[in-house]
Image (tube, rainbow, N blue to C red):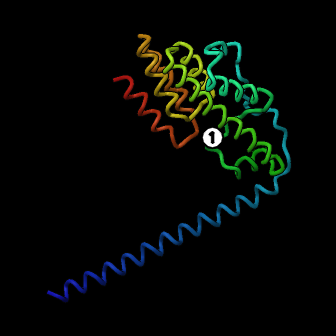
Amino acid sequence: MKFPLFASFIVFTIWLTYEIGKHNRIDEAVNQEFWRKEHRANKIRRKPLDDLDYITIPFDSLPMHILPDDERVSEYKEVLNSLSDSKIVNFTGITNTDLKLQYGAPNIDLLSKYDQNYTVLARTLNMWAAYIYEKGYPKEAREILEFAVSTKTDVSGSYKLLCQIYKEENTPEKIKELYPIVESVNSIMKNTIFHILQEAEQ
């Protein structure tokens, strides 16, 4: 009985060694390709940024008048006002290497700042909408969330709350209008958001 067990152990050891070696080779190839791409990207000269999809905050269509004396609301508005003088671009899902390849290595710090601005925007809109919804302003929360979604945010909470509001307003058909937007979201959260929409339709 011992020999078959020993033979099985030997076979398992050989298989495990092979699998480890295979994965190491794959990892090494991926790593080499990354550095080749990064080296190439670092040589790309500065390119014009005129074609970027800049985001403008539509203050006229956002509920800036709601809860004017609320401290948290004031903080959210202050963040949005501070972003209004900055350039905002959604680069979610795009690596720095790809940005350098497309727009030139000298632009990477600027592009990273634009993307950071977007991250702050998306999170602030989500928190602002959730807060005023809890305070009894679903219509105004919807206005905020619809703008957030139009920027292709990947904050899943924004989609979840928006779907909830659509159902409460007896307009569940609007949930279907979100699918094409989510399809264009460049994020690992895409499938999670699709699942949120599907659950909301049930």
Q: Quadrant of residue 195?
A: top left
Q: Position of residue 120 (x, y in %)?
A: 66, 35
What residue is drawn where x is 70% and y is 18%? 58
User: Which quadrant does the N terminus fall into?
Assistant: bottom left
- Residue furthest left in the image: 1
User: Which quadrant does the C terminus fall into?
Assistant: top left
Label 1: how many residues lie within 10 Å, few (<14), some (14-19) or many (20+)?
some
- Residue furthest bottom in the image: 3
Q: Quadrant of residue 150?
A: top right
**Is 25 above or below relative to 70?**
below
Q: Which residue is mark 1?
A: 92
What residue is drawn where x is 71% and y is 52%? 97
What residue is drawn where x is 48% and y is 69%? 23
All told, the count of numbered labels is 1
**Is 119 above or below relative to 176?**
below
Q: Is residue 167 left or right of residue 131?
A: left
Q: Position of residue 99 (x, y in %)?
A: 73, 46
Q: Position of residue 51 (x, y in %)?
A: 78, 32
Q: Nearer the viewer, residue 66 or 29?
A: 66
Q: Quadrant of residue 143?
A: top right
What residue is drawn where x is 65% and y is 27%? 76
**Is 132 above or below relative to 191?**
above
Q: Is residue 106 left or right of residue 93?
A: right
Q: Position of residue 54 (x, y in %)?
A: 74, 30
- Residue furthest top in the image: 170
Residue type of the residue flagged with mark 1: Thr
Q: Nearer the viewer, residue 192 or 130?
A: 130
**Is 32 above or below relative to 83?**
below
Q: Secondary structure at mark 1?
A: loop
Q: Nearer the viewer, residue 57 or 51?
A: 57
